[in-house]
């Protein structure tokens, strides 16, 4: 294994090195801490939870371990580059396994569509189920690759905090029809409504409505095809823990179970943070991995803001909420052999359900579910002979005059979800339950301090992306930076890691910071 440069490690330990405080130990915050440590900063990470990972953390119950949020890694090279920037080897620290198939999509008519890493297998699957749409599917993949090159490798990996950064990209937006939605683009290429769904649902995993989110996000289809869908053994929690080990190896300080109450400023200059317990942590710069709405609205509540005001966040479009049922079963080894690691179960409606969730903000009786069964790949998540699952259903967030009262709706909705799973995937599972935990938008609001209980921060619509999104470097305060789902380039594991890459381009090396600002 490649070791850290000892000079960097020594500099990070020096009390004279510039000090960076990272608020939040989500994947974006940990990636930021790693890169700051590699630049020579003394780094302190503070998080209110009892473990690393933020939404990518885990809980355990009766021998079952549940990944709470993201479950897949689609662009491993962003992690390999992150580790390399820190003088380490990612594959020596994290065990990634390629999923094959990537996932299966099911419809109520009995159709089962699997997506494979092998190009020929994938083409054969399309020809088997959607033969008349094969050419359109090939065109869609080319469209996806073009948007990946422009959107992810180009715009997504560089700062977008200046208006000119956006203006330079406008010809590309026009050429690639960024004004068209993901669903509209899929509908332009293929005719079968099932394939339209399969090519357009991906924005739901970053908090966007496929009918309204810019077609730039069809790039996810290329990500899957080019880099695969992977699972980190031990779950995303193991990945977060490995990131924590790198930070500690850089002499960084990780403080769990502490909540930052306020970011301290002197005029426009950041001076540190104050915890709920009243402790002051002085800092030369602060990186917030908290939601931008919470960062500006709560952590800087006493400060005057010019752009990122309470009014601006109040009128923004926020991602949907999530209802997630984490449950374990015992004595089910060998049962439901047709249910793999990742399964997407469609209800009777697609566009109508999206409208209920995002526009009407109505809790519908029907649903579509992402079912995660990691025990297929990773036996450590469940006791011997058992299984570990989570079932995720997109639901309305808590905005509106009459938001869903989850204190009343939790159990009725769980029962509907259970009937759906019994019918579509795992009949008889409730007889084998050995663990159960439910998160609703209320949980996201209290556990993750997510405004309006939104699952993925601001919805990634075209006028809430790139320059229009809260910037990685704050224009409100000197020495304040943002990473994570709510800032550029957006939500999703690859993007939150890439937000630390953008940060890396904006923050000078520690020695230069001290020379410039002392």
Image: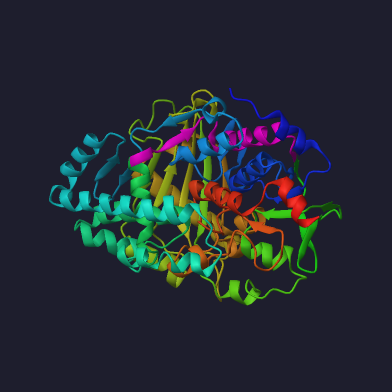
In this rendering, the answer to whether 214 lies above or below 118 is: below
* Residue at x-position 63% and y-position 71%: 308
Q: Is residue 91 or residue 516 the one in the foreground?
A: 516
Instruction: Identify the image quadrant of residue 62.
Output: top right
Specify the principal SS of the magenta part.
Answer: helix
Residue at point 34% right, 47% down?
Answer: 222
- Judge whether residue 402 is colored magenta: no
Residue reaching furthest front? Answer: 515
- Residue span colored magenta: 226-253
Question: Quick one: quadrant of the C terminus?
Answer: bottom right
How was the colour assigned to the protein in this rendering? rainbow
Q: In this view, does 187 lie to the left or right of 96?
A: left
Q: Relative to the observer, which residue lies in front, 39 or 113? A: 39
Residue drawn at 73 percent across, 43 percent down: 41
Answer yes or no: is residue 263 visible.
Answer: no
Relative height, residue 267 to residue 395 (above, below):
below
Whether residue 246 is in magenta: the answer is yes
Residue 463 in picture, x, y percent from top left: 46, 70
Tell me if 511 is positioned left or right of 74 in this view: right
- Residue 23 placement (x, y as % from top left): 70, 52
């Amino acid at each position: 294994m490649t070791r850290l440069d000892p000079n960097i490690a020594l500099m990070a330990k020096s009390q004279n090195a510039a000090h960076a405080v990272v608020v939040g130990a989500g994947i974006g915050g940990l990636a930021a801490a790693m890169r700051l440590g590699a630049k020579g900063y003394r780094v302190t990470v503070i998080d209110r939870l009892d473990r690393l990972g933020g939404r990518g953390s885990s809980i355990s119950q009766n021998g079952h371990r549940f990944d709470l949020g993201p479950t897949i890694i689609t662009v491993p090279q962003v992690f390999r580059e992150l580790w390399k920037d820190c003088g380490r080897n990612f594959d020596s620290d994290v065990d990634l396994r390629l999923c094959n198939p990537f996932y299966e999509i099911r419809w109520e008519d009995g159709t089962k569509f699997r997506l494979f890493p092998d190009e020929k297998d994938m083409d054969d699957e399309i020809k088997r189920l959607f033969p008349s749409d094969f050419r359109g599917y090939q065109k869609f993949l080319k469209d996806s690759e073009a948007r990946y090159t422009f959107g992810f490798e180009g715009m997504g990996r560089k700062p977008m905090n200046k208006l000119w950064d956006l203006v330079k990209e406008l010809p590309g937006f026009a050429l690639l029809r960024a004004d068209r939605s993901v669903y509209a683009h899929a509908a332009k290429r293929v005719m079968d409504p099932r394939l339209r769904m399969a090519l357009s649902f991906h924005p739901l995993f970053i908090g966007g409505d496929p009918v309204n989110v810019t077609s730039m996000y069809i790039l996810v289809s290329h990500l899957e095809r080019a880099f695969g869908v992977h699972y980190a053994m031990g779950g995303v929690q193991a990945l977060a823990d490995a990131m924590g080990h790198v930070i500690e190896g850089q002499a960084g300080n990780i403080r769990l179970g502490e909540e930052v109450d306020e970011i301290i400023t002197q005029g426009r200059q950041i001076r540190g943070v104050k915890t709920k317990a009243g402790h002051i942590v002085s800092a030369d710069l602060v990186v917030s991995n908290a939601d931008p709405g919470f960062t500006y609205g709560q952590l800087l509540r006493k400060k005057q803001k010019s752009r990122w005001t309470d009014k601006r966040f109040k009128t923004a479009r926020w991602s949907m909420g999530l209802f997630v049922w984490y449950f374990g079963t015992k004595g089910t080894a060998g049962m439901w052999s047709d249910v793999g690691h990742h399964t997407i179960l469609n209800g009777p409606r697609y566009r109508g359900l999206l409208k209920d969730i995002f526009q009407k903000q109505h809790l519908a009786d029907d649903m579509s579910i992402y079912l995660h069964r990691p025990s297929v790949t990773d036996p450590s998540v469940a006791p011997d002979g058992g299984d570990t699952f989570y079932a995720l259903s997109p639901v309305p967030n808590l905005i509106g005059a009459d938001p869903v009262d989850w204190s009343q709706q939790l159990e009725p909705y769980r029962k509907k979800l259970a009937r759906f799973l019994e019918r579509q995937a795992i009949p008889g599972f409730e007889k084998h339950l050995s663990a159960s935990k439910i998160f609703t938008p209320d949980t996201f609001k209290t556990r993750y301090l997510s405004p309006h209980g939104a699952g993925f921060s601001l919805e990634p619509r075209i006028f809430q992306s790139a320059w229009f999104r809260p910037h990685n470097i704050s224009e409100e305060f000197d020495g304040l930076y943002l990473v994570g789902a709510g800032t550029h380039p957006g939500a999703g594991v690859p993007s939150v890691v890439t937000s630390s890459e953008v940060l890396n381009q904006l923050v000078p090396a520690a020695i230069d910071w001290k020379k410039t600002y002392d």
